[in-house]
Image (spheres, rainbow, N blue to C red):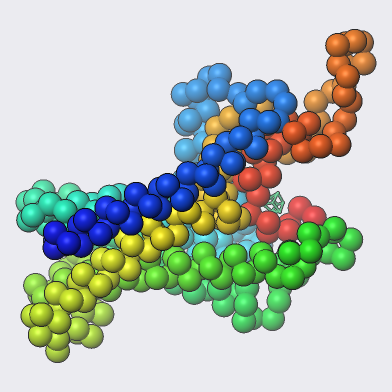
Amino acid sequence: MLTPVEQIAFLILALLAVGAAYSGFRDVYLIVNRGSGTLQWNKLPARLWNALVIYISQRTTLKMQRRLLTSLFHLGVVWGFTFYFLVNFLDLLRGYIPNFDDSLVSSGLLDELYRLTGDLLSVAVLAGMVYLIVRRFILPARKELKYHDNVLLHPKVKAGSVDRDSLIVGVFILIHVGARFLGEAVHIAATGTDLSSPFATIVAPLFSGASEGGLLFYEHLFWWLALGGIVVFLPYFPYTKHFHLMMAPLNFLTRPERTSLGELEPLDFEDESVEQFGVNKLEQLSKTQLMDAFSCIMCNRCQ
Ligand code: SF4
């Protein structure tokens, strides 16, 4: 558990971060709302189910035959990152509620399953992120990670802003998940082997030489790196292409029935109230098309 000073400091930091992030999220909301038409909220239960199935199965993203390794690592990162919503929430409670760990342990099998899933998915995310970073920045550049010559690029993209964004997000995820994983290893070094956390148990001897005070210091340090990292990252989230993590499921939830992503609404030349045909400003795109843009991870595959 955090000290009272740490608890107040984290609360202040979180409030500042939410305040700073508000304007970014609000901008996205306003941009989408400037679009024409409406988002589809009809048949909501069926749409929710469809968006959830697509998100969990990643069936629109995975290409098991052509990119098996990349698909599997990507799947591990998505599942791990999703599970971390629960992990972060419970870690927050661990930081604020006395003996919260004991309450978790008392739930028996449920707690063991939670720790096992967290341990396995932490390693899946770390391995996946290392692979994706190495693939993008170190391995010989793959064709699908390059822009075609005939694609018009914003000057900032030409200057490498998308690669820089990928690096920032990759390092953030490594710090966030890595710190949480090491925090569990410290906990095991202090309390003894945990069969429900096999990977953290393997790493725990790294900290076995630390004194009681040293272990406490590491535990607090890794808590701050893991949860403080999210809070510091939050204001940047609406500006990264990885905002698609949030926008893509929302896009699936609200999209109209269409035969392909780029399908255009038919023009009604008989409707005399229509003054604008086609699009020459962003706001003349439909809301769904603007959602499409925010959902794009800029993988270049459609170009
Ligand atoms: S670049 Fe094309 S294929 Fe890739 S995420 Fe964006 S819209 Fe989809």
Residue 147, percent from left and from top: 78, 65
Instruction: Identify the residue shown where x is 21% and y is 70%.
Output: 220
Quarter the N terminus occupies: bottom left
| Residue closer to the observer: 94 or 140 | 94
Q: How many numbered dots are placed on residues in this image?
A: 0
Q: Is residue 204 above or below residue 73?
A: below
Instruction: Identify the residue shown where x is 72% and y is 26%.
Output: 36
Residue 200, percent from left and from top: 25, 73
Residue 153, percent from left and from top: 81, 60
The image quarter in which residue 105 lies: bottom left
| Residue closer to the observer: 192 or 60 | 192
Residue 79 visible at all: no
Quarter the C terminus occupies: bottom right
Q: Is residue 185 above or below residue 93?
A: below
Residue extending farthest right: 269
Residue 22 visible at all: yes
Instruction: Identify the residue shown where x is 48% and y is 30%.
Output: 48
Residue 276, percent from left and from top: 87, 24
Left or right: residue 106 versus residue 181 is left
Instruction: Identify the residue shown where x is 56% and y is 43%.
Output: 247
Residue extending farthest bottom: 209
Left or right: residue 217 versus residue 249 is left
Left or right: residue 203 versus residue 265 is left
| Residue closer to the observer: 65 or 240 | 240
